[in-house]
Amino acid sequence: MKYKNNINGIILVNKPKGLTSRDVVNKVQKIFNTKAGHTGTLDPLARGVLIVCLGKATKLTEELTCIEKEYIAEITLGYETDTLDTEGKIIKEKETNITREELIKTLQKFIKTYNQEVPKYSAVKVNGKKLYEYARKGEEVTLPKKKVTIYDLSLLDYENNKFKIYTKVSKGTYIRSLIRDICHELNALGTMSNLARISQGKYKIKDTFTLEDLEKGKYNIIPIKELLDMKVVKVSGKLKQKIINGQKLDFDYDKVLFTDINDKELAIYKKEGKELKVYKMLYSNEKELTKV
């Protein structure tokens, strides 16, 4: 099923293991024939909730990345790789003998805010260059640290030198790095062998659609006004014209989404000083298009 562009909103995709997040976005873009982008990368090894923005909603990706995420991860003990997951090259090996009690106690220590060292195989930039570019060339670079918060962390299973955890984390947390840190605290080595993102903010895995669903026309597009935790105000006439012209406004809102009387999104305004100024312009003169 193909669509003309001007579909605006988000679609919740259950990313399959083996594809990059960009691969998924490219497929969604092709299915809907519109601009698309995601709000938070999932490694190729991982599966689960990937929020894909369509059309004008691509302007709002940063609004949706600043939210908590939940994961279920599997860790295989006894070795560590350069990528911190089973896709990488083994760089260290060590026999491990950890009790369930030791593991549970250590997991509890990581329910905190701390400075997490990012993986060297990541897209974080240092001196204008992505870390994985240094890593692939064998170039040494000081890995940056980012403040992250682990809100919840618990043991789900531990058997045959593997354990499974549930965790709820802040934006920017690398689960691969969290696993490395947990294993080092245990004086052990471990590598992420499976990962599923089961939620991002209020969006749960039960609400997602597979790529096969999308191809068959089975999906739900969430409109822009439902994505944002802010005041929504309908306008018309001269005020509408001021907004689509990007003029400053005198309203007592910190941040507000203006729509027309037909619920078409016009712009998000944000308070700067005593005035409201355009934060994101969503209006376009394009005629609304429908399925073909």
Image (cartoon, helix red, strand yellow):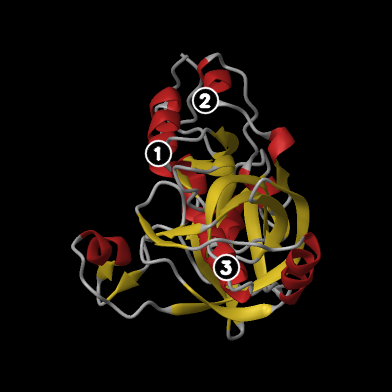
- Ranked by sequence position, the earlier of labels 3 and 1 is 1
Please say whether residue 204 is visible from this viewpoint: yes
**Looking at the picture, which amino acid does disc 2 mark?**
Leu
- Ranked by sequence position, the earlier of labels 1 and 2 is 1
Q: CA distance from mark 1 to mark 2?
A: 17 Å
**Looking at the picture, which amino acid does disc 1 mark?**
Lys
Residue 35 is marked as 1
- Left or right: 68 as drawn, with respect to 287: right
Where residue 1 sits: x, y (%)? 47, 14
Give the residue at mark 3: 188
Q: Who is closer to the viewer here, 259 or 112?
A: 112
Q: Secondary structure at mark 2?
A: helix
Taking 247 as reference, is 267 above or below it? above
- Left or right: 44 as drawn, with respect to 225: left
Tell me the residue at 73%/68% (across/down): 107
**Looking at the picture, which amino acid does disc 3 mark?**
Ala
- Ranked by sequence position, the earlier of labels 2 and 3 is 3
Give the residue at mark 2: 211
